[in-house]
Image: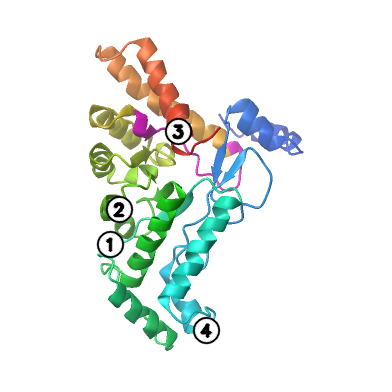
């Protein structure tokens, strides 16, 4: 525990570790992590531990329609048509894979059926310098059309898509259910749905049960609410194939020490769920250990094809 009496000594001990080798010591030696899926848009570096996961990329290198809109309005995008722009975005994905990307990151957003004509109208309107903003509860036709095109490219490249769902800001716009049409339109694409879809954990479980190209990822969720994560995992085990559940992702951006803390929470949640089932006679100790190994190691390794 951190107390008034020990926080200075703990801080001093942490500072002693701040030297080359810190990441290796924490991630590999302490956490026994083989590979880190890192949301980085520049994969041009040589580090066998960090595996880049760039953004799928609708506007700029991100998925923000507003960023793309302002770029077009200001004339920063030198494309005469939506076809030219999508060809550029597709080529970007192909180059990122060649440079070592192992997947692409995406964010769930309000869905509408891809409509090229409506998307072209919005694109043309923006090129004429007119602002185009969608309301919170109205899907964006240009954003959805572009997403559909890029998912098709990702499918041809054989690249998984890691999808942020729920959790923060206006989480209605990132509802995991908004991914269902994409999942159905692109059965060749492997979707890794992140954060348990919090707070829509049951919806996410149903999606995992119904679609073979979906994995359910507990990344970050065990930190946000261990109780909700544990209850959801217990329910998932009733309906979701055990080879489609991933138990851990730290979602840590800066302090590498937090990875250990997040991993500890994830282990405690999984242990609590499996122990409940052990107590009810639904599995034995050996089966529980096999499940834990699959959730923490085999499933993410198979999904992201990590050697």
Please determine whether, in this image, residue 81 is positioned above or below residue 164. below
Residue 179: numbered disc: 2
Choose between 39 and 45: the one closer to the eye: 45
Residue 165 position, x and y percent, is: 36, 50
Q: Is residue 53 left or right of residue 117?
A: right
According to the picture, the residue beneath numbered tag 3 turns out to be 302
Mark 3 vs mark 4, foreground winner is 3
Q: Residue 189 location, x and y as percent?
A: 37, 48
Quarter the N terminus occupies: top right
Residue 61: x and y, percent? Answer: 52, 63
Residue 119 drawn above or below residue 205: below
CA gap, disc 3 and disc 1: 29 Å
- The residue nearer to you, when weighing 55 against 12, is 55
Residue 293 badge: none
User: Which image quadrant is residue 19 in?
Assistant: top right
Highlighted range, magenta: 243-257
**Closer-to-camera residue (160/277):** 160
Determine if residue 267 is in view: yes
Q: CA distance from mark 3 to mark 2?
A: 22 Å
Is label 3 in contact with label 4 (beta carbons under 8 Å)? Answer: no
- For label 3, the crowd category at 10 Å Cα-Cα, with few meaning under 14, some 14 to 19 and many 20 or more, is few
Which label sits in the foreground, 3 or 1? Answer: 3
Q: Is residue 251 magenta?
A: yes
Q: Identify residue for label 4.
A: 75
Tell me the residue that label 1 is attached to: 111
- Identify the residue at image location x=48%, y=28%: 297
Residue at x-position 23% and y-position 31%? 239
Q: Quadrant of residue 110?
A: bottom left
Q: In the rendered structure, which disc, 3 or 2, sits on the residue that comes first in sequence? A: 2
> Disc 1 versus disc 4: distance between alpha carbons?
27 Å
Q: CA distance from mark 3 to mark 4?
A: 43 Å
């Amino acid at each position: 525990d951190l107390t008034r009496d020990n926080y200075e000594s703990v801080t001093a001990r942490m500072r002693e570790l701040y030297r080359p080798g810190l990441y290796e010591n924490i991630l590999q030696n302490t956490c026994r992590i083989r590979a880190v899926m890192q949301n980085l848009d520049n994969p041009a570096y040589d580090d066998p531990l960090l595996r880049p996961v760039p953004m799928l990329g609708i506007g700029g290198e991100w998925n923000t329609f507003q960023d793309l809109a302002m770029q077009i309005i200001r004339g920063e995008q030198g494309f005469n048509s939506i076809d030219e722009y999508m060809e550029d975005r597709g080529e970007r994905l192909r180059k990122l894979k060649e440079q070592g990307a192992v997947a692409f990151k995406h964010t769930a957003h309000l869905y509408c059926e891809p409509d090229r004509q409506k998307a072209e109208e919005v694109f043309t309107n923006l090129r004429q310098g007119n602002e185009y903003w969608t309301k919170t509860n109205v899907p964006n036709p240009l954003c959805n059309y572009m997403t559909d095109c890029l998912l098709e490219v990702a499918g041809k490249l054989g690249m998984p898509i890691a999808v942020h769902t729920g959790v923060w800001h206006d989480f209605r716009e990132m509802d995991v259910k908004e991914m269902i049409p994409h999942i159905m339109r692109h059965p060749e694409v492997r979707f890794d749905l992140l954060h348990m879809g919090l707070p829509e954990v049951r919806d996410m479980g149903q999606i995992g049960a119904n679609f073979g190209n979906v994995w359910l990822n507990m990344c970050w969720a065990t930190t946000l609410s261990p109780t909700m994560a544990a209850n959801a995992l217990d329910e998932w085990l009733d309906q979701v194939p055990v080879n489609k559940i991933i138990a851990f992702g730290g979602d840590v951006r800066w302090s590498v020490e937090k990875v250990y803390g997040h991993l500890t929470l994830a282990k405690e949640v999984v242990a609590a769920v499996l122990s409940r089932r052990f107590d009810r006679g639904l599995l034995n100790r050996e089966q529980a250990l096999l499940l834990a190994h699959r959730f923490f190691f085999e499933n993410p390794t198979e999904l992201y094809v990590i050697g």
